[in-house]
Image (cartoon, rainbow, N blue to C red):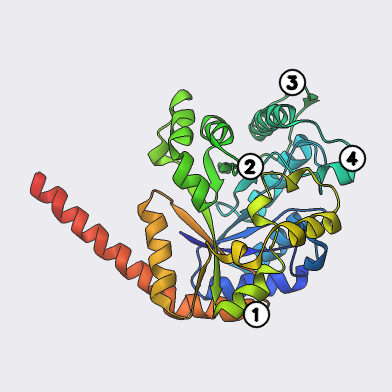
Amino acid sequence: MVGFMLAHEQFPVTELVELAVAAEEAEFDLLATSDHLQPWQANERHSGQAWVTISAIGQRTKRVWIGPTVTCPTLRYNPAVVAEAFASLSLLYPRRIFLGLGSGEALNEQAATGLWPKWPERSERLVEAAEVIRKLWTGQQISHHGKYYTLDAKLYDPPTDPIPLLMAANVGPKAMYRSGQYGDGLITDPETWKQHRAAFESGAGASGKDPKRMPVLVEQFVVVGDENDAKTSAELWKFLPKAFKSYFNIRDPQAIQARADAELSLEKIYSKWQVSNDPDVHANALIGLFRSGATIVNVHSGQSDQKRVIEFYGKDVLPRVHEQLKEALVVAARAMSRKA
């Protein structure tokens, strides 16, 4: 599957819904939305409510998968509220909703609640919250008295179809192991996937799961254009190299932007992006990620003209990707038949 990222940080909800419609028409398979109270940087200027957007997108589209990358179910949102919201979304749009979960950032959790525990507690909260969500989705009366959450409740409108629960990891082997152990799948970035794939697979194995049967969503930043286009985009996403190393502990988007301006060059930001007007460059990047074990590549562009990116991918990139993957499957099938 190839996804397209709908960034609440950079665009208003009304525009994101229209972009979602265009992305489905361009033959993207999945639409992912960020879920923030505030943008990472103040100059991104937006931050709509993700679940409202997802519902509006579901109404305007017919087949694409839709979900957040990612929702934090620990402080700003109680896990029972998350369970109820996504159960309802799945009833509205059957077999089209997934839930991405993560341990959160101060710009959302601390800003909304005044609370920001250390990472070990945030990680424990995430694991327990996922347990609560799954229990509620059964539709049974639950009595949960855990370390962080106490619930005596029943979800009277549970989902009728399974909702994939993907867990995010962008900081290293511990988070990757946790995602494999407690998630139905993974949300990550290309570098983390390359460096710590083994930790994810070990976590999955520890829970008796086959990692080869688990969805792996890898988010790839792209620019359809030249270096000048990349620089313009990077001004809005300058925090990325340190987002999950230190900036996630900063509550104020203006402070994050000031730190990023002082500490990171624009070239540092887009050095690992795919920047080109050549569709083969973009197609080869996606194919490389699929061959590395990713099952979903989520295309994210920071460009202001999102429809240019969507149309370029729909016309020139996705057909190349589909054709090359089809050829690879034919070759693999032939090899298997010879062995048989």
Labels 1 & 3 near each other (Cβ < 8 A): no
Labels 3 & 2 near each other (Cβ < 8 A): no
Residue 257 appears in view? yes
Find numbered disc 1 in the image and state the secondary structure of the residue it sits on: loop
Structural crowding at the residue carrying mark 3, measured as other residues with C-alpha within 10 Å and reported as few (<14), some (14–19) or many (≥20): some
Labels 1 & 2 near each other (Cβ < 8 A): no
Measured Cα–Cα span from mark 3 to mark 2? 20 Å
Structural crowding at the residue carrying mark 4, measured as other residues with C-alpha within 10 Å and reported as few (<14), some (14–19) or many (≥20): few
Measured Cα–Cα span from mark 1 to mark 2? 37 Å
Residue at the disc numbered 4:
113
Q: Name the one closer to the observer, 310 or 275.
A: 275
Residue at the disc numbered 3:
144
Residue at the disc numbered 2:
159
Q: Name the one closer to the observer, 177 or 135.
A: 177
Find numbered disc 3 in the image and state the secondary structure of the residue it sits on: strand
Amino acid on which disc 2 is placed: Pro
- Residue 281 vs 123, above or below: the answer is below
Horizontal arrangement in the rendering, residue 51 relative to residue 167 (left or right): right
Measured Cα–Cα span from mark 3 to mark 4? 23 Å
The image quadrant that residue 300 belongs to is: bottom right
User: In the rendered structure, which disc, 1 or 2, sits on the residue that comes first in sequence?
Assistant: 2
Q: Quadrant of the C terminus?
A: top left
Measured Cα–Cα span from mark 4 to mark 2? 29 Å
Residue at the disc numbered 1:
305
Amino acid on which disc 1 is placed: Asp
Find numbered disc 4 in the image and state the secondary structure of the residue it sits on: helix
Query: Where in the figure is residue 113, as x and y percent of width and height?
Result: 89, 40
The image quadrant that residue 79 belongs to is: top right
The image quadrant that residue 124 belongs to is: top right
- Given this view, does label 1 or label 2 mark the residue nearer the observer? 1
